Image (cartoon, helix red, strand yellow):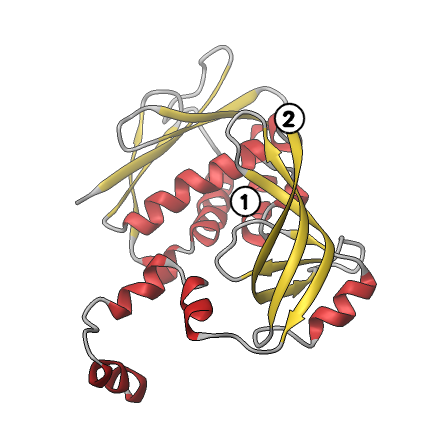
Amino acid sequence: MMFKFALNINDDNQQLTPENGLDFGDLSELTSHLRKALESRRQGKCVLSSIENHGYTPNFTTESELIYNKFLRVHTDIQEKSIADLTKEEATYANTLKKILSTDKYVEAIDTNRKTLVKLTSKDIETIAENYSVITNQSGIVSEIGSPKLEDNRHIYLHSLDYKIFITAAQEQILKDCYRKGFVELKLKQRRSIKTGRILNATLIDLRIKPDITLAESLSNLSEDELAIFENINTVDDILTLLRS
């Protein structure tokens, strides 16, 4: 199946066209940072297939459902989250969009059914969605820790979760010993979008290091893609063959 999606860039006066659109350098920067945000180099091929005369509308085509779903998620993230809550690649792309849109343009992310998923101006990129707080517990393995800049707030990611968990300096010292190897149980204060219920970010309230992890707990933390390797496992011998491969 082929997935098609697009970015419609225009202004309130509908003045942008393929002949009166983005500067070549801006388009290059935009598509380069979008590719990194979509992780398209690892997930498959994505092609800039055309630029339509509906504003200035770069159209993209891919056979990868992962790339297409990431396109949808990235733009929903940018609409709902602050730049500080985005991943490094999403934040770079969001800042590029903000610069290109300036004060008088907007961008619409168009899905494969030619429907507008989100509409963003430069001001929207700065604004976090209205939200409420929920106290909850999560457990898993720390897959990322720290921050790209010294002045940024410290954070972690748990494997298979797509939102930042902000931590203190003292918590960071404890969690460093668990990075990619320890199983942790966390008490979190989540911020969730009022409109969609999506988790925007979380703050760590308390934590507990769990020294031992069962096989069932390990499997529960795998993503759908990672679980796919077990599709043809039926016997103990099948498991042993997989472990030796």
Give the x, y percent position of residue 18: 36, 27
Q: Residue 149 at x, y = what percent?
A: 74, 59
Q: Is residue 214 above or below residue 186?
A: below
Q: Is residue 64 above or below residue 233?
A: above
Q: Where 127 falls versus 213 (above or below)?
A: above
In the rendered image, the quadrant that contains the C terminus is bottom left
- Using residue 219 as the reference point, say whether residue 64 is left or right of it: left
Residue 124 placement: quadrant = top right
How many numbered tags mark residues here?
2
| Residue shown at the point (69%, 77%) measured from the top left | 177
Query: Is residue 90 shown to the viewer in this render?
Result: yes
What secondary structure is marked by label 1?
Answer: helix
The image position of residue 228, as x and y in percent, is 28, 64
Residue 112: image x %, image y %?
A: 28, 33
Residue receiving disc 1: 93
Residue at the spot 28% in from the left edge and 48% down from the top edge: 65
Residue type (three-letter) at the residue carrying disc 1: Tyr
Q: Quadrant of the N terminus?
A: top left
| Above or below 170: residue 61 | above
